[in-house]
Image (tube, rainbow, N blue to C red):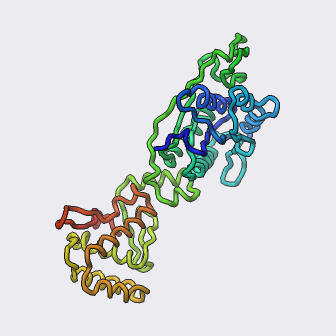
């Protein structure tokens, strides 16, 4: 597995409120304090509020006094892209930029905004994302961590920074400087920034990405939609079939199937769920299987374009190759719609070995409507 610091595109993502120091503290911990495998970002992205962005631009990116530029100069960090356009202000559903996150509506907007940003930043396979949850309100950190759990890949990391107690939260402290520099704590006591320590605490997290459906990975699903899907996937499966429209949904999510795959899946349901038998993978082509399947296919799609071809293929019976190929195509359709984890209860499963292999669904009649 390629390690995060070896990826050509390395992204640092953080949230901040009134303390933009989180950016320089995390950057220092990733690049300077980490001696073995420093993660030097190629770009930095920050999520904040209107006031938080203004403060970050002035304190981090000011051409003369910006602490981000000073950190890069102090420690020879080159090529890190970070500008005001990469500081994103959370907006509500009406597009109004938020100055704080206090109400339930503002929290919902923050959750959706953060979820979509993490989704966006994890789509490039050539990138590694490092997420810091040290800044901003606690709910912002929670949403950011949960979003990474949803969309994070093997190369992505989650962390918090720990700062020497005397320096923590001081407006004048941004990172340990290479040379002696005096600042003052809240009681007017002098402190040397050169003596401070910043430690990166890596946080393990569960990666759920491989179990997510494509509509979550490729779309702009909200935080609440993602949660609803995760809850549905953990509950009892429910398959709903609309014969009039020739379509079906699994746990309320549409599963697009071609005509022949729709008919085949219904045939599997008919045989293994309602007739309570298993489909045998036989050495010789099975004429009974082909006859019962074709009868159902013709009832559902009498004018199907491939009807003649399918009838010709199954004229001598349904063989093991045709059967397993069709099962694979149905599996691919369900996994594309629901993700691997969400699709599992609806798949046609193989049982047995060698000449005793059979296929069946694990769904019960009560789970099908």
Q: Is residue 298 above or below residue 351?
A: below
345 displayed left or right of 37: left
Q: Position of residue 38 (x, y in %)?
A: 57, 32
Q: Position of residue 16 (x, y in %)?
A: 65, 36
* Residue 260 falls in image quadrant: bottom left
96 displayed left or right of 308: right
Residue 308 visible (yes or no): yes
Residue at 32% from the left image edge and 82% from the top image edge: 296
* Residue 237 falls in image quadrant: bottom left
Residue closest to the eye, 295 or 44: 44
Residue 104 visible (yes or no): no
Q: Residue furthest right?
A: 64
Q: Residue furthest top?
A: 189
Residue at 50% from the left image edge and 53% from the top image edge: 226
Residue closest to the eye, 290 or 40: 40
Residue at 69% from the left image edge and 29% from the top image edge: 76
Q: Quadrant of the N terminus?
A: top left
Q: Residue furthest left?
A: 356
Q: Position of residue 162 (x, y in %)?
A: 56, 25
Q: Quadrant of the C terminus?
A: bottom left
Total numbered badges shown on the rendered structure? 0
Residue at 53% from the left image edge and 40% from the top image edge: 4
């Amino acid at each position: 597995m390629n390690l995060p610091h070896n990826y050509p595109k390395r992204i640092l993502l953080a949230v901040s409120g009134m303390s933009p120091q989180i950016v320089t503290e995390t950057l220092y911990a990733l690049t300077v304090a980490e001696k073995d495998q420093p993660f030097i970002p190629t770009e930095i992205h920050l999520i904040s509020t209107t006031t938080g962005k203004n403060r970050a631009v002035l304190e981090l990116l000011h051409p003369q006094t910006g602490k981000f530029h000073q950190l890069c100069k102090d420690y020879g960090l080159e090529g890190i892209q970070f500008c005001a356009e990469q500081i994103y202000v959370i907006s509500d559903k009406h597009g109004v930029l938020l100055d704080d996150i206090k109400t339930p509506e503002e929290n919902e907007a923050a959750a959706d905004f953060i979820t979509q940003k993490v989704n966006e930043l994890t789509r490039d396979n050539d990138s590694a994302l490092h997420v810091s949850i040290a800044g901003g309100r606690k709910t912002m950190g929670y949403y950011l961590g949960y979003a990474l759990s949803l969309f994070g890949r093997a190369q992505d990391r989650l962390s918090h920074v720990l700062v020497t107690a005397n320096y923590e939260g001081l407006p004048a402290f941004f990172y340990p400087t290479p040379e002696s520099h005096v600042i003052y704590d809240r009681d007017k006591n002098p402190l040397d920034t050169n003596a401070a320590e910043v430690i990166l605490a890596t946080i393990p997290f569960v990666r759920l990405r491989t179990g997510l459906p494509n509509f979550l990975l490729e779309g702009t699903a909200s935080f609440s939609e993602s949660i609803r899907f995760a809850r549905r996937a953990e509950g009892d499966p429910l398959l709903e079939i609309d014969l009039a429209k020739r379509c079906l949904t699994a746990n309320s999510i549409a599963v697009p199937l071609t005509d022949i795959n729709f008919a085949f899946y219904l045939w599997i349901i008919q045989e293994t769920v309602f007739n309570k038998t298993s489909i045998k993978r036989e050495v010789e082509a099975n004429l009974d299987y082909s006859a019962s399947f074709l009868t159902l296919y013709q009832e559902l799609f009498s004018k199907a374009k491939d009807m003649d071809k399918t009838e010709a293929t199954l004229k001598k019976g349904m063989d093991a190759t045709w059967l397993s190929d069709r099962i694979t195509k149905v599996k691919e359709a369900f996994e594309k719609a629901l993700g691997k984890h969400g699709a599992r209860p609806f798949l046609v499963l193989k049982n047995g070995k060698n000449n005793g292999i059979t296929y069946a669904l694990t769904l019960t009649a009560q789970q099908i409507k």
